[in-house]
Image (cartoon, rainbow, N blue to C red):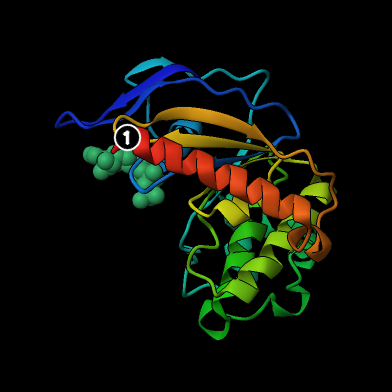
Amino acid sequence: MDGVDKVFPGGIRALHDMTLQVNEGDFVSLLGPSGCGKSTALRLIAGLMQPTRGEIRWEGTAEIGVVFQEPTLMPWATVEENVYLPFRLKHRRFVQVAEDIRLALRLVGLEGFARAYPRELSGGMKMRVSIARAMVTRPKLILMDEPFAALDEITRHKLNKDLLDLKEKISSTVIFVTHSVFESVFLSDRIVVMAARPGRVFRELAVPAPYPRGEEFRTSADYAALCRTASDTLHHAMGESA
Ligand SMILES: Nc1ncnc2c1ncn2[C@@H]1O[C@H](COP(=O)(O)OP(=O)(O)OP(=O)(O)O)[C@@H](O)[C@H]1O
């Protein structure tokens, strides 16, 4: 993103001069207070809307998978039919992609649930279906907008860990929106702290901890120190925008 502004009709300036580079294989978190434009940035990157000013450039073509805060599953369709959706939109026949669907469900730990309906699943399982759907076509870039915000802490920790394992396996690039300091430090190799009114990049923080990361990292002194730095930076960002 190069010098991107987004002004909504009515004059709300959601983003101002946002510049951000994401490289292949990065796990980048956008961390910031409510209303700082994180979702707007993600929607611009997804091409769901256009910037008012500035540019979003790609090297090569980008296929994108998106995971929203709500799992947004079709309640009348089974798990495998839900995961089939991105292929259906590309006019691929189910039988041609059945193996990809099976593999995606296996990667998110839902092998036995292909024929289940969303109402039969827990919140965490629904989110796993949503993740399987986002990655079933093996997009280069996965955009996630606070996907775990509505889950309990234990489930959230489990899904954080599983998401990192999954990323290793499918080697995608991930841009992850969150307002949780802890989550951003656990997951990402770079945290983009944003400030509000107008939304912009306040500072970028590197998380120099090796992957794979698990409970050992989450309970380490390094993790605690990184969380403190991120938390302080977030407070500065909020102070500047208050
Ligand atoms: N479609 C829209 N029309 C007008 N204003 C909008 C629209 N979408 C977002 N905004 C405004 O733009 C600003 C940024 O919103 P955005 O949802 O991107 O923030 P956010 O950081 O994702 O917030 P949250 O963490 O609460 O989801 C807010 O002031 C919001 O009210």
Q: Closer to the camera, 193 or 68?
A: 193
Q: Position of residue 66 (x, y in %)?
A: 55, 47
Image position of 192 with respect to 222: above or below: above
Q: Is residue 36 above or below residue 134?
A: above
Q: Amino acid at mark 1?
A: Ser
The percent coordinates of residue 145 (x first, y second) are 50, 50
Q: Residues within 10 Å of mark 1 (few under 14, many from 20)?
A: some
Q: Which residue is mark 1?
A: 241
Whether residue 15 sits left or right of residue 2 in the image: it is left
Can you tell which quarter of the image residue 164 is in?
A: bottom right
Secondary structure found at label 1: helix
Residue sitting at x 63%, y 34%: 205
* Quarter that holds the C terminus: top left
Q: Residue at 69% of width from left, 47% of height from top? A: 137
Asked if the beta carbon under badge 1 is closer than 8 A to the nearest atom of ligand 1, the reply is: no
Residue at (52% x, 43% y) in the render:
232
Q: Position of residue 235 (x, y in %)?
A: 44, 43
